[in-house]
Image (spheres, helix red, strand yellow):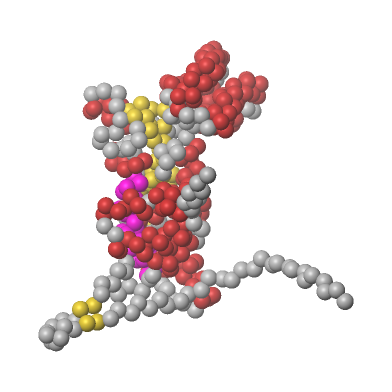
Amino acid sequence: MRRRQRQLTELLDYEPAHFFTRRIVRRKFVRRDHPYAAPIIAKLHTLQDRCIVAPGLLAAIIVGKYCDHNPLYRQEVIFATRHDIHLPRQTLSQWMWLAADWLRPIYEHIRTGVLGGGYVQIDETPIEYLAPGNGRTKLGYMWTCTRPGGDTVFTWHTSRAASCLESIIPPGFRGTVQSDAYSAYPAFVREYNASAGCEAITLAGCWAHVRRAFFEARESAPRTCGWVLRHIGHLYEIERRLRESGAGPRLREATRAAQSAMILRRLRAALVLLQPRQLPQSAFGKAIAYTLDQWPALERFQADGRIEIDNNLVENAIRPTAIGKKNWLFIGAADAGERAAILYTIVENCRRRGINPHAYLRDVLTRLPKMKTGQIPEVTPEAWAKAQKPRSEPKAAA
């Protein structure tokens, strides 16, 4: 009889994560000629003396909260009920402080890079925090800065005032800040330029917010709003083609001058004619006023190929924090916001680079105790992602 081939069936399975103890054995030595001298023992390169957390566990807790939006109290319950490991949430919180302190140099390096390119997008999102003695929460803000094509950095402040930007934007900054129409941004730019004695910062607007305003006003003026939205759609269609072709700043600037400029002129002329005919308090009237009030900032993108048409990149970076606060509701204290800003920055830049945040954090937290300050640029998410790419093998000689 002929033996038939075996049939192979593959099933995708899963094995839950588990805890284990990592033991580090270090030998002690005593000099023969000085037997009563203190023994010599190898250095212990750990995150903190007499701390039981290892980099892998610390990375898992960070990813659980700041990437998977799992609050510490839920992780405490999961560890106890599924693994019989009892770790109080106070201990988990202290470990987050430990991780933020170790990752701060990487955070500062990312921050310098984001704000050192001459073009940055900025937005802010409210997050509640506990205020001891008040019996309630107060409202703080996570300010987010993004360099298109680069990294993102979060900064925590307990207010939304224009003065917060003084600590976010470095003193020697020269370039473009892109934002929504919140009044703090033009107020800061005016004061900054006045103190600099020149137009050091130019403000760029966001067409996504304009499109949103007219979309919400469709019921009050459906035909006219539709006409405006079609013209805005033409602007976005030009941007889509440029993005798909991989156009650089010079080509983007030339294409916008040839195609987008005439759409902008037609749109502005129409809005100027329509404004006197609309009730100022109507949805359509407010949308027109909103657009014309910031028109110089809105047309800034056509004169500079580096500038995006909208602020969507920074809003996308904010989205994980918005999802997270629905689960953990508020930050434990005002100073804990700084810790969250550091850890959110690291996790978000891992996401942008398409790398596994747990693998990155476990590797970096293992290496940091043995590294020098000058080696910090080697362990940023950008540098780490490049190091993980397989090197191309040299071509064989012909």
Where the N terminus falls, by quadrant? bottom right
Res 30 → quadrant: bottom left
Residue 175 falls left or right of residue 75: left
Q: Position of residue 150 (x, y in %)?
A: 42, 41
Res 152 → quadrant: top left
Q: Position of residue 215 (x, y in %)?
A: 60, 30
Q: Position of residue 348 (x, y in %)?
A: 45, 50
Q: Which residues are magenta?
A: 91-111
Q: Residue at x 35, y 32 (%)?
A: 118
Is 108 magenta? The answer is: yes
Farthest front residue in view: 398
Q: Residue at x 52, y 44 (%)?
A: 398
Q: Is residue 336 above or below residue 305?
A: below
Q: Position of residue 144 (x, y in %)?
A: 40, 43
Q: Is residue 131 above or below residue 234?
A: below
Q: Residue at x 40, y 61 (%)?
A: 363
Q: Main secondary structure of the magenta part?
A: helix
Is 358 magenta? The answer is: no
Q: Nearer the viewer, residue 27 or 196?
A: 27
Q: Nearer the viewer, residue 360 or 331?
A: 360
Do we see residue 358 in this rendering? yes
Do we see residue 264 in this rendering? no
